[in-house]
Image (cartoon, rainbow, N blue to C red):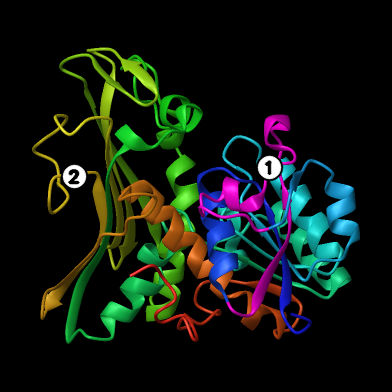
Amino acid sequence: MGDQIRVVVWGTGNMGRAAIRAVDAHPELVLEGVIVANPDKVGRDAGDLGRLGRTLGVAATTDIDAVLAAGPDAVVYTASGDLRPEEAGADVARALRGGAVVVTPSIYQMYDHRSAPPEVRDPLAAAALEGGAALFVSGVDPGWANDILPVLATGLAGTLDEIRCQEIFDYSTYDQPDVVRFLVGMGQPMEDEPLMVAPTMPTMVWGDQIRLIARALDVEVTEIREVVERRPLESTITNVMGEFLAGTQGALRFELQGIVDGRPRIVIEHVTRIHPSCARDWPLPPDDVEGAHRVIIEGRPRIEITVEATDEGGNRAAGGNATAIGRLVNAIPWLRNADPGLYDALEVPLLPAVGRLGTGHA
């Protein structure tokens, strides 16, 4: 175990649970600590929090100072940055200054660090250099479906007219009411504008992924356009997050269009519902259940790749979280050997799961 990389998971929500499992499964990593914000989780074993069905001998704590003082080699930061971006940035900088590699999906503006606002990028870059550590930010919706997967798919193409990355998702089983109701706007009055699609917000969150694809293809995006559609619920529905009333928002669709040579050429599209009955004329997942990620390459040949990931008993929201966090956790050994600094999805290779074939329950 002495040669293993000592890892801390900071945050144990939907992403953090998956992070605990991913660290536990990786033969080069060992879980050393778990940081939580909820006092009800203090003292609980990481295996319990990660829904592993067994204990790991690591108890959750709110004592950030003590965990970081132990000098972990890496931190998987999964605490939410949606509604607390400044606090998330400060937490990540603190871990970097202590010498830990940090991987995180929580700081959207750092997906393409070259175009990040200086006030966001510069403190993180300085912290990485001070601590001699590396930072890799990726993972929203999940990141690989909007950057590395479409880039790899273009390598199969002849002519290339448009790249479209879709997330098609039913939020019924996604037990994150603050995000679903107040960020996405599900169940809110139609006259209210959801924060997620307020003007410039989609570009702030997903624009970097368009820029990453453009950089990989060596093309110039001259403009990013935002197109938004919303639909109300036709009847009241109830799910794990409670009641959603008829007439309130039941479906949301938006496109982020990267304009190249005057036309939308790189498009990130989200189709989200709170119930399968909403907006049936919009794109649907292959089996009409929960959701999927899809990459469509318009050209010759036309290429369409649909990815359906499940975890935690077949839940596709959990599957998406697990693949996003898997990309980050699997990058930790590579980042430990990289020069200090900031890294993005085009710089960090997609690494195979060496040593893990046959390690599941099948």
Amino acid on which the number 1 mark rests in the picture: Arg
Q: Give the CA distance from mark 1 to mark 2.
A: 33 Å
Q: Which mark is residue 185?
A: none
Residue positioned 27% across, 80% down in the render: 154
Residue positioned 22% across, 14% down in the render: 236
Image quadrant where residue 172 sits: top left
Q: Quick check: 269 left or right of 35?
A: left
Residue 58 vs residue 269, the one in the foreground: 58
Q: Quick check: 275 left or right of 64?
A: left
Q: Circle 2 is placed at which residue position?
A: 289
Q: Which quarter of the figure is the C terminus placed in?
A: bottom left
Residue positioned 26% across, 59% down in the render: 308
- List x then y, in percent, for residue 280: 10, 36
- List x then y, in percent, for residue 334: 63, 82
In the rendered structure, which segment of residues is drawn in magenta?
A: 27-56
Residue positioned 79% across, 57% down in the render: 93
Task: Note whether residue 221 is visible.
Answer: no
Q: Which quarter of the figure is the N terminus placed in?
A: bottom right
Residue 117 vs residue 55, the one in the foreground: 55
Task: Give the label, 1 or 2, closer to the camera.
Answer: 1
Element under disc 2: loop
Image quadrant where residue 169 sits: top left
Residue 47 colored magenta?
A: yes
- List x then y, in percent, for residue 315: 33, 47
N-terminal label among 1 and 2: 1
Amino acid on which the number 2 mark rests in the picture: Val
Q: Circle 1 is placed at which residue position?
A: 44
Residue 3 colored magenta?
A: no
Q: Is residue 22 above or below residue 356?
A: above
